[in-house]
Amino acid sequence: MRAVSGIALGLALVAVTVRPVAAQNEMIGFDKVHELLAGKQTRAAAYAMQEVSVDFRKELGRCHDEAIGGRMMQTEPRIDGLGAKIASGAVSAAALDKEFGEIDHLLAEHHQQLAAEGFSRPRFTKMETVARDVSLAAQYLARSSRWVKQPLASDMQKAVDDALAIAKQLAADPGNPPVETPAVIDALGVAVKRPMRVAQGGSTP
């Protein structure tokens, strides 16, 4: 795992402000990788993991938070390492569950931070983009719990459900954000900062 300096991340964030990266519309395809590998389609799974790596780098390019960005930079070679293991046939689908869960949890934090920042700066961020980030944060948090066979606590599930509902309203009428939007984004922020619980064994979403 490579060390990440504040200078290196700072330079990366400067690059982002000069050439911003478009928001993702869909979740990164860990589901596809898992399904292909479980079906013994090793080559196709390895190729799908390459797509995951590209999409993760795009998300890193959107990050504006030094702490989250540092963790994402440390995760990048980990994803590449998993891709190499998949290509060599050295890893099973079940063995990826915890790995995918941890990365999804990090992506949930990343998108929640972007949503909170974007909503606080309406002159610089479209509400449609905020809606996508809120939705993705909620979906990644939910999927991370499914990977590790741990249902979300009731308050965390409520935060996810509320976030998905707000995201839908924001996308439908971006000019009139619901008054509860900042509170819902903040509640999701509390949820994504909780440590991920891991059960014995693996699971699929």
Image: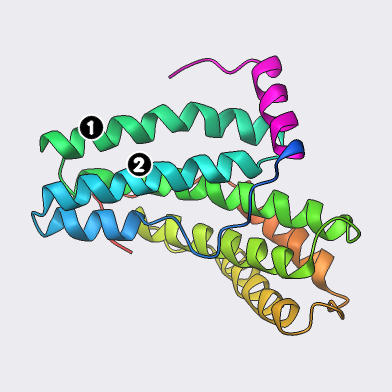
Residue 76 visible in rendering: yes
Magenta stretch bounds: 1-17
The disc labelled 1 sits on which kind of residue?
Ala
* Residue lying at 57% horizontally and 62% vertically, measured from the top left: 136
| Most frequent secondary structure within the magenta stretch | helix
* Position above or below: 16 against 131: above
Residue at point 54% right, 48% down?
A: 107
Label 1: element kind: helix
Looking at the picture, how far across and down is residue 109, in whole percent?
62, 48
Q: Which mark is residue 84?
A: 1
In the picture, the quarter occupied by the N terminus is: top left
The residue furthest front is: 19
Q: Mark 2 Cα within 10 Å, few/some/many (few <14, many 20+)?
A: some
Three-letter amino acid code of the residue under disc 2: Glu
Task: Identify whether 111 is placed above or below 3.
Answer: below
Residue placed most toward the observer, 94 or 190: 94
- What crowding class fits label 1: few (fewer than 14 Cα within 10 Å), some (14-19), or many (20 or more)? some
Q: Nearer the viewer, residue 11 or 18?
A: 18
Q: Is residue 2 magenta?
A: yes
